Every structure is written in structure tokens, then in C-alpha cells.
Amino acid sequence: MSDELWDEQDGDSDGMRAVRAALKKSEKARKEAEDRAAAATKSLGQKTVTDVLAAKNINPKVAGFMPDSLDKGDEAAVVGWLKENADVFGFSLEAETPATPETSVSPEEQEGHDLMQLFQGDSSPAPADKMAKLAALNPADFANNREYRDAIAKVVG
């Protein structure tokens, strides 16, 4: 179909003119939406690449060498490309170790746990050392904790 069929004709009714105007308006809006989506996708891809490079301590200039065919919005694709080309750019991606979960243990709790491990462990110090550590404890700290009381009772005997 040629565009002539969609252009205004002299004999068109008002309704047909309105339909053509609405069609042109909706096509323009669709084109603008596609352009905004493409720009957002590109921006997201650039952010993903920047974040990955920063997290891996890699020079951000490496991003300029990534091919356009690479899905830069997909972090796994970016990391895969970096692993594949690490030797070309002179960096190495070390095997990532899983992060250990951080615990919020108070120093007193940690000291009590360490003391319990000391009493229950195979490589325990001499009994005099155990008794010195035991004497330094505040009994009120362990009055309501059966686990620590049991560990102390095991040492004392």
C-alpha cells in the first residue's frame, strides 16, 4: 500500500480525517516511546557495565571495547565477556568466594563462646589457665545460660 491512501484526500469525510489524524498521532507517540525505551535500555546497560567493572576493580575504559552485540544490561553476560577477554586486557578475574554472613555478636557473647570452646576443645590449656579464666568471669553473666553453666560445670568437675 502506498502512503497516498493514508494521506488526506479532497473528498474525505470529517470522520476519515479524524481517523487519519489519530493514526498519525498514535504512530508519533509509539515512535517516541520506542526511542525512550531504547535510551533507557542503553543507559541501564551502561550502568550495569560500569558497576561490574567497578566491583571487579577493572579500568572503566575496557567498556569501550565491548561489542554492541553484547547484552550490556545482563550482568552475567558482561562478566562472561570479561572472563573471556581478561588476558587480552591484562587483568584476571579471581574466583569469587561466597561472602560470609555477618553476625552481630556482642563482645561479651563472643568471649563467652570462646571460653566455652576453650573448655570443650581438645587442645585446651592447662587446668590452671582454665581456672584463671573461670575466676575472671562474672557469674551473673552466665546465670541464665544453661550451655555456659554446663561447660563450666564440666571443667570444675
Image: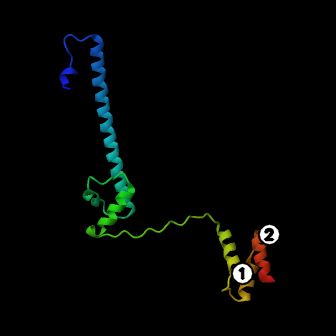
Mark 2 closeness class: few <14, some 14–19, many ≥20 residues within 10 Å:
few
Residue 3: name its quadrant: top left
As drawn, the label of residue 119 is 1
Q: Residue at x 71, y 80 (%)?
A: 120
Looking at this view, is 116 or 9 the one in front?
9
Element type at marker 2? loop
Say which residue label 2 marks.
Answer: 143
Neighbourhood count class around disc 1 (C-alpha, 10 Å): few under 14, some 14–19, many 20 upward: many
Query: Label 1 is placed on what type of residue?
Result: Phe
Tell whether 4 sits left or right of 27. left
Give coordinates of residue 85: x percent, y percent. 29, 65
* Farthest residue, direction right: 157
Measured from the top left, where is residue 76 in percent x and y?
39, 58
Question: Residue 77 location in percent, x, y?
Answer: 36, 57
**Alpha carbon distance from label 1 to label 2:** 17 Å
SS at mark 1 in the image: helix
Between discs 1 and 2, the one toward the N terminus: 1
**Amino acid residing under circle 2:** Ala
